[in-house]
C-alpha cells in the first residue's frame, strides 16, 4: 500500500496546477480514446452506410447513453466515497466499498439488459425513429444492450482505480478497447458489410476485452487493493451500501434526467427526418470532443476535492476550481474557432452527403454554444461531486434536464415556431444551468460546511 499512500499524499499536497494536470492527463487521454472509440462508429457508418446509418448510430447512442445512468451515478459515488476514505486515512471500509460496487452494478446491468431487450421497439417508437433507419437502429441498439454488462463493469473498475488516485490504468484499458473497436469496425462494416450491427458488435467486443483485462489487473494486485475476490467479499457492506445509495441515487437521477430530456428533445428532432437526425448525431459527437478535456478535469478535480476535504485542506478547493475553469474554457474556445472556420471539413469527416452538409452549416452556432457550455459547467460539477452534495447534484439534473432543456426546447421550437433550430438551441442553453447553480454554491462557500460522506 506504500505506493498508494504516496499517491494519495501527492493529491493533498504540492502545487494544485501540477497535480491537477498530472492526475487529469491520463483521464484526458482515456476520454480522448473513448471519444475516438465512439466516433469511429459514426465515421465508418457514415462513409460506408450513409445518412440512414448515421441516424441509427445517433439514436442508438442516445438510448445507450440513457442506459448507463446507473453505471455513471454509482461509479462516481463509489469514487467519491473511496477518495474520502483514503483522504481521511480510513482503510477499513475500502474492501466493503469495492465489493458493494461490484454487486450493485452487475445486478443493475443484468436487470436493465432483460428489461430493455423486451422494451426496445417501444422505446424506438417513442424516439420517432425515422422509417429509413428503423431496422438499422434496432440492430445497433439491441447489440449494445446485450453488451451492457461490459460497459457497467468498465465504469466500475475505472472508478475504483481513480478513487485510489490511479488514473493511468483506466487509460490503458480504454486504449485496448479503442484499438479493438477500430480494427473490428473496419473489418465488420467495410469488409463484411455488416452495417450498424457490425459497428455495435465491434463496440461490445472492444468493451469486453477492456473489462476482462481490468478485472485481471485488480485480481493480480488484490493484496495492494485490499480486496481478495472471495465470494463472501461481494456481499454488500451494510455500512457502505446506505452511503453509496445516498450519494449515488441522486447522481443516477441527475444523469437520467439529463439523458431523458435529451431523448425527449431529440424525438422532436428525429421527426424532421433522417438528415436532421444524422446532423444532430454528428453535432453531439463533435461536442463530445470538448467533453474529452472537461470531463477529464472534472473527474480529476472531483477526486482532488474529495481527498482534500477528507484531509481538511479547504484552502486548496478554490484553486482546483479556478485552474480547471481556465483550462476548460481555453480548449472550448479553440474548438469553437476551428468549427466556425472549417465547418464543412469537420462535418465532412463523418458524411459527405450534400443534404447533411447543408443542414450542418446551420448547426455551427449551436456547436459553439455546446462547447462553451461544457467548459463553463465542468469545474462546478467537480466541486459538487467532490464534496458529495447529493441533493444539489439532483437539483442541477432536474433543472438542467426536466425544466430547462424540455421547457426551452418546447418554448423555442413550438411556441416561438423556430422549428428544429429551436430544439437545438433549447438543448444547448440548458447546459449552462450547472454553471450558474454551481457558481452560486462556490461563491457562497457552502461547500466548506459539507459533512464527509465516508
Image (spheres, rainbow, N blue to C red):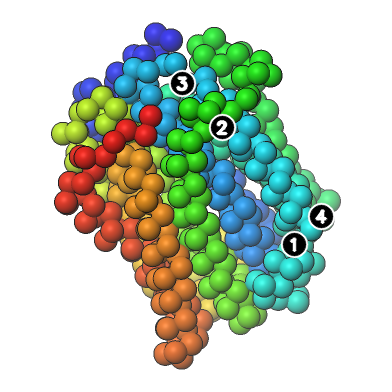
Q: Distance between the residues labelled 2 and 3?
A: 12 Å
Mark sitting earlier along the chain (1/2): 2
Which percent across, then down, holds residue 94?
47, 21
Relative to 96, is 91 on the left or the right?
Answer: left
| Element marked by disc 1 | helix
Q: Residue at x 61, y 70 (%)?
A: 278
Do residues under tags 2 and 3 come within 8 Å of each other at their CB atoms?
A: no
Residue 195 lies in what quarter of the image? bottom right
Mark sitting earlier along the chain (1/4): 1
Do residues under tags 1 and 4 come within 8 Å of each other at their CB atoms?
A: no
Which label sits in the foreground, 3 or 1? Answer: 3
Q: In the rendering, which numbered label is found on residue 194? A: 4
Q: Residue at x 51, y 50 (%)?
A: 252
Query: What residue does disc 2 label?
Result: 101
Q: How far apart are marks 1 and 2 (CA)?
A: 27 Å
Which label sits in the foreground, 2 or 4? Answer: 2
Query: What residue does disc 3 label?
Result: 93
Q: In the rendering, which numbered label is found on residue 10? A: none
Number of numbered discs visible in the structure rendering:
4
Q: Distance between the residues labelled 3 and 1?
A: 39 Å
| Element marked by disc 2 | helix
Mark sitting earlier along the chain (2/4): 2
Other residues around mark 2 within 10 Å, as few (<14) / some (14–19) / many (≥20): many
Other residues around mark 1 within 10 Å, as few (<14) / some (14–19) / many (≥20): some
Which label sits in the foreground, 2 or 3? Answer: 3
- Nearer to me, 102 or 327: 102
Mark sitting earlier along the chain (2/3): 3
Which label sits in the foreground, 4 or 3? Answer: 3
Amino acid at each position: 500500500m506504500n505506493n498508494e499512500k504516496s499517491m494519495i499524499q501527492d493529491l493533498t499536497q504540492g502545487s494544485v496546477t501540477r497535480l491537477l494536470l498530472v492526475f487529469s492527463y491520463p483521464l484526458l487521454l482515456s476520454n480522448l480514446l473513448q471519444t475516438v472509440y465512439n466516433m469511429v462508429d459514426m465515421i465508418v457508418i457514415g462513409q460506408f452506410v450513409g445518412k440512414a446509418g448515421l441516424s441509427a448510430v445517433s439514436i442508438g447512442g442516445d438510448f445507450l447513453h440513457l442506459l448507463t445512468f446507473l453505471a455513471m451515478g454509482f461509479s462516481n459515488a463509489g469514487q467519491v466515497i473511496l477518495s474520502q476514505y483514503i483522504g481521511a486515512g480510513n482503510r477499513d471500509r475500502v474492501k466493503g466499498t469495492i465489493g458493494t460496487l461490484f454487486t450493485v452494478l452487475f445486478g443493475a446491468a443484468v436487470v436493465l439488459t432483460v428489461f430493455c431487450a423486451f422494451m426496445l421497439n417501444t422505446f424506438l417508437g417513442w424516439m420517432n425513429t425515422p422509417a429509413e433507419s428503423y431496422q438499422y437502429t434496432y440492430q445497433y441498439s439491441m447489440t449494445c444492450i446485450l453488451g451492457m454488462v461490459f460497459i457497467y463493469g468498465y465504469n466500475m473498475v475505472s472508478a475504483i482505480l481513480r478513487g485510489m488516485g490511479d488514473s493511468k490504468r483506466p487509460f490503458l484499458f480504454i486504449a485496448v478497447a479503442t484499438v479493438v473497436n477500430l480494427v473490428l469496425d473496419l473489418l465488420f462494416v467495410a469488409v463484411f458489410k455488416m452495417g450498424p450491427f457490425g459497428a455495435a458488435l465491434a463496440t461490445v467486443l472492444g468493451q469486453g476485452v477492456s473489462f476482462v483485462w481490468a478485472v485481471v489487473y485488480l485480481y493480480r494486485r488484490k493484496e495492494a487493493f485490499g480486496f481478495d475476490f472471495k465470494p463472501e467479499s461481494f456481499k454488500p457492506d451494510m455500512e457502505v451500501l446506505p452511503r453509496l445509495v445516498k450519494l449515488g441515487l441522486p447522481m443516477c437521477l441527475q444523469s437520467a434526467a439529463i439523458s431523458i430530456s435529451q431523448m425527449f428533445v431529440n424525438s422532436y428532432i428525429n421527426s424532421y427526418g433522417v438528415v436532421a437526425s444524422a446532423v444532430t448525431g454528428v453535432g453531439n459527437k463533435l461536442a463530445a470532443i470538448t467533453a474529452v478535456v472537461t470531463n477529464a478535469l472534472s473527474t480529476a478535480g472531483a477526486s482532488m476535492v474529495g481527498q482534500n476535504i477528507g484531509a481538511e485542506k479547504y484552502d486548496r478547493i478554490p484553486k482546483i476550481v479556478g485552474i480547471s475553469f481556465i483550462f476548460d474554457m481555453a480548449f472550448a474556445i479553440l474548438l469553437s474557432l476551428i468549427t466556425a472556420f472549417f465547418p464543412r471539413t469537420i462535418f465532412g469527416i463523418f458524411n459527405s452527403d450534400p443534404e447533411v452538409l447543408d443542414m450542418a452549416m446551420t448547426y455551427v452556432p449551436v456547436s459553439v454554444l455546446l462547447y462553451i457550455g461544457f467548459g463553463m459547467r465542468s469545474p462546478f460539477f467537480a466541486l459538487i461531486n467532490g464534496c458529495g452534495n447529493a441533493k444539489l447534484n439532483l437539483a442541477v439534473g432536474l433543472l438542467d434536464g426536466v425544466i430547462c432543456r424540455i421547457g426551452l426546447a418546447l418554448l423555442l421550437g413550438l411556441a416561438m415556431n423556430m422549428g428544429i433550430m429551436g430544439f437545438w438551441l433549447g438543448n444547448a442553453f440548458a447546459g449552462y444551468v450547472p454553471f450558474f447553480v454551481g457558481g452560486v454554491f462556490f461563491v457562497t462557500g457552502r461547500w466548506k460546511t459539507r459533512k464527509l460522506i465516508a
